[in-house]
Image: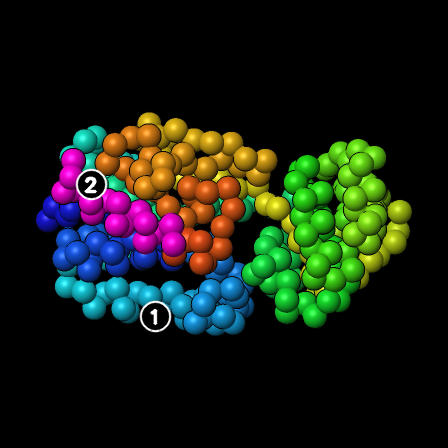
């Protein structure tokens, strides 16, 4: 069967895009590898009507509502390659199966790579976070830490101070000038320049090379992100951010390749569930309208 649109990625952005197309009664196929970015988190916050719910429960509800539309098909699988242009695209799954559509929406999300520090990855989504708007409130204004991974650590530390007393662990990963240090001091942010050697404890105890250990209720870090290679293989332009690249899109979420749209974390420098849903809805509406007016 040839669909009007294939959505690669069935997390929040992908399902939001597919929903708009389903409501326009267009045949749409969602292909999902089952690797939601927030799968390590116990709860999702900041999304109206779902604040505090488990990410898996939100996704399950979204999928059940989406699949109630008869024009939606779903494949659990991994897209290995894609090709095409204009009004004809095809994707190949890891099984060798091919699917065809007039439009593509890339909603693949990104992969996070954390600094190589023992104990950090094991606490990802539980006491090590990247977004204070998603996870800061529940830390109850307890002592917090920012682990520098790049120069954006200054910006993050300035923000995190609103959620609790903050220590910036420089860890030889960012450079601060005198003006930035003064700004951090005015915000009450403490600076630690000793190298971080490990993270332990029920929450996040930060161990330093000089032998000290500083416990924090939560540790914030900006991971290095990597999106799907599909976009570059299809010729879509990319933009660079301090933490990774993302797909360039216009105001309607169309990429630099006509007929290919992108939404969610793969198409923005930062994101959340709320932003992903909004992005996806816009991409779905734009893809639908392109079928009519192009």
Q: Horizontal and vertical percent for residue 141?
A: 73, 67
Closer to the camera, 244 or 155?
155
Q: Horizontal and vertical percent for residue 80?
A: 31, 40
Q: How crowded is mark 2: few (under 14 residues within 10 Å), some or many (20 or more)?
A: some
Task: Determine which residue is flagged by label 2.
Answer: 290
Disc 1 and disc 2: Cα gap in Å? Answer: 29 Å
Closer to the camera, 112 or 166?
166
Report the residue at 51% width, 64% height from top: 46
- Magenta residues span 278-294
Q: Which of marks 1 and 2 is in front?
A: 2
Closer to the camera, 14 or 172?
14
Secondary structure type for disc 1: helix
- Residue 63, above or below 251: below
Query: What is the chief secondary structure element of the magenta stretch?
Result: helix
Task: Determine which residue is flagged by label 1.
Answer: 61
Report the residue at 73% width, 36% height from top: 174
Report the residue at 45% width, 67% height from top: 48
């Amino acid at each position: 069967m040839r669909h009007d649109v294939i959505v690669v990625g069935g997390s929040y952005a992908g399902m939001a895009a597919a929903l708009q197309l389903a409501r326009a009664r267009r045949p749409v196929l969602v292909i999902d590898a089952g690797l939601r970015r927030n799968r390590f988190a116990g709860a999702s916050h900041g999304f109206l009507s779902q604040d505090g719910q488990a990410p898996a429960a939100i996704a399950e509800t979204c999928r059940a509502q989406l699949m109630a539309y008869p024009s939606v098909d779903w494949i659990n699988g991994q897209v290995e390659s894609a090709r095409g242009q204009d009004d004809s695209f095809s994707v190949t799954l890891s099984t060798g199966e091919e699917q065809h559509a007039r439009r593509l929406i890339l909603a693949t999300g990104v992969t996070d790579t954390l600094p190589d520090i023992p104990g950090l990855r094991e606490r990802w989504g539980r006491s090590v976070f990247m977004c204070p708007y998603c996870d800061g409130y529940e830390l109850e204004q307890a002592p917090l830490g920012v682990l520098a991974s790049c120069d954006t650590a200054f910006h993050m530390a300035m923000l995190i101070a609103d959620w609790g007393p903050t220590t910036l662990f420089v860890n030889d990963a960012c450079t601060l000038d005198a003006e930035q240090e003064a700004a951090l001091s005015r915000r009450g942010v403490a600076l630690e320049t000793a190298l971080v050697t490990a993270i332990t404890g029920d929450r996040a105890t930060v161990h330093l090379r000089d032998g000290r250990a500083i416990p924090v209720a939560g540790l914030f870090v900006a991971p290095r992100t990597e999106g799907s290679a599909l976009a570059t293989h299809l010729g879509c332009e990319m933009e660079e951010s301090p933490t990774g690249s993302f797909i360039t899109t216009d105001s309607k979420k169309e990429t630099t390749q006509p007929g290919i749209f992108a939404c969610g974390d793969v198409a923005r420098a930062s994101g959340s569930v709320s932003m992903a849903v909004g992005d996806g809805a816009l991409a779905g509406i734009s893809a639908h309208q392109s079928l009519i007016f192009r």
